[in-house]
Image: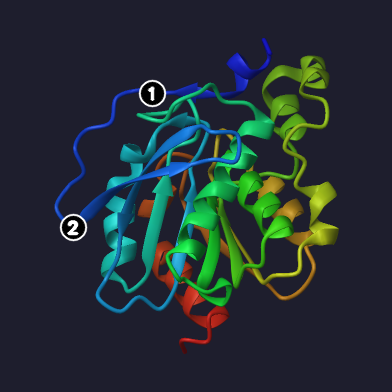
């Protein structure tokens, strides 16, 4: 659809994975082959299934991937269809199928649901919340995410936001969310306003946690002091590793 070209901004260029990161290939229910990176410590306390934002690809956050693994959690970071080396073309229904495939690939490798955390950044937060309404998860952690896509579009495009319709509507799905939630947001985010992160958190059921990334913008949020530690602490808490 034409609007998809205004939502998804894939980068096809993915370098070889750094040392300590393994490549994986995952096939979706509709036959699309996805590329993924996997990093893990020797004895992970949890596994994060990472749904990235709407721009770039998995290579854009490799330093975060490595930091999380070094802190004790395994991370499966996959590229949506049409991103990086993944086949296909992105769409809202398509990226949901991609998330399911990534989750199911970990379950097929023997990782129990009570050790899996749906983890998403920006648009990937909406994907992660959707995933947790479809599959059992120990928890959901979202960074720089939003209430619904139309709310973000309204900030930048005014009346044209109506074009977004009901796409990526996390608010509508919170009633079906039955897993603990962590919402983290930069208080200087210029892409997804901090207020949208607050609204998402306020609408979510308990149990939930909020992390204010002080001084952080949209793209530098993971550099905020304490954010990586907060994600790991949440993963440890919801998987019973504390």
Label 1: which residue? 11
Nearest the eye: 220 or 139? 139
Mark 1 burial class by Cα count in 10 Å: few <14, some 14-19, many 20+: some
Q: Residue furthest top?
A: 2
**Which residue is at 53% across, 44% downward?**
188
Note whether residue 64 is visible. Answer: yes
Q: Residue at x 76, y 52 (%)?
A: 199
Do residues under tags 2 and 1 come within 8 Å of each other at their CB atoms? no
**Residue 22: image location, x then y, percent:** 25, 52
Q: Which residue is at 76% across, 69% downward? A: 178
Which coloring applies here?
A: rainbow
- Nearest the eye: 34 or 191: 34
List x then y, in percent, for residue 17: 21, 43
Q: Which residue is mark 2?
A: 20
The residue sitting at 77% across, 41% down in the picture is: 169
Label 2's element?
loop
Task: Look at the image and tell me whether residue 122 can be seen.
Answer: no
Q: CA distance from mark 2 to mark 1?
A: 23 Å
Q: Residue furthest bottom?
A: 242
In which quadrant will I find the N terminus?
A: top right
Residue 150 appears left or right of 132? right
- Left/right placement of residue 64 relative to residue 184 reads left
């Amino acid at each position: 659809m034409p609007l998809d070209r205004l939502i998804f901004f894939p980068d096809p260029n993915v370098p070889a994975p750094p040392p300590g990161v393994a490549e994986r290939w995952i096939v979706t229910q509709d036959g699309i082959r996805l590329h993924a990176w996997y990093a893990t410590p020797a004895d992970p306390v949890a596994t994060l299934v990472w749904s990235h934002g709407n721009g770039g690809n998995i290579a854009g956050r490799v330093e975060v991937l490595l930091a999380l693994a070094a802190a004790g959690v395994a991370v499966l970071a996959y590229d949506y269809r049409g991103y990086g080396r993944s086949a296909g073309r992105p769409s809202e229904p398509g990226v949901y199928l991609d998330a399911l495939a990534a989750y199911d690939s970990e379950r097929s490798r023997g990782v129990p649901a009570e050790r899996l955390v749906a983890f998403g950044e920006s648009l990937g937060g909406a994907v992660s919340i959707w995933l947790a309404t479809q599959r059992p998860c120990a928890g959901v952690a979202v960074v720089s995410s939003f209430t619904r896509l139309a709310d973000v579009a309204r900030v930048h495009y005014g009346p044209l936001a109506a074009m977004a319709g009901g796409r990526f509507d996390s608010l509508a799905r919170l009633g079906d969310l039955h897993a603990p939630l962590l919402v983290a947001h930069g208080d200087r985010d210029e892409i997804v306003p901090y207020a949208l992160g607050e609204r998402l958190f306020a609408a979510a059921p308990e149990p939930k946690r909020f992390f204010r990334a002080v001084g952080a913008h949209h793209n530098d949020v993971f550099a905020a002091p304490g954010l990586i530690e907060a994600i790991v602490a949440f993963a440890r808490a919801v998987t019973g590793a504390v």
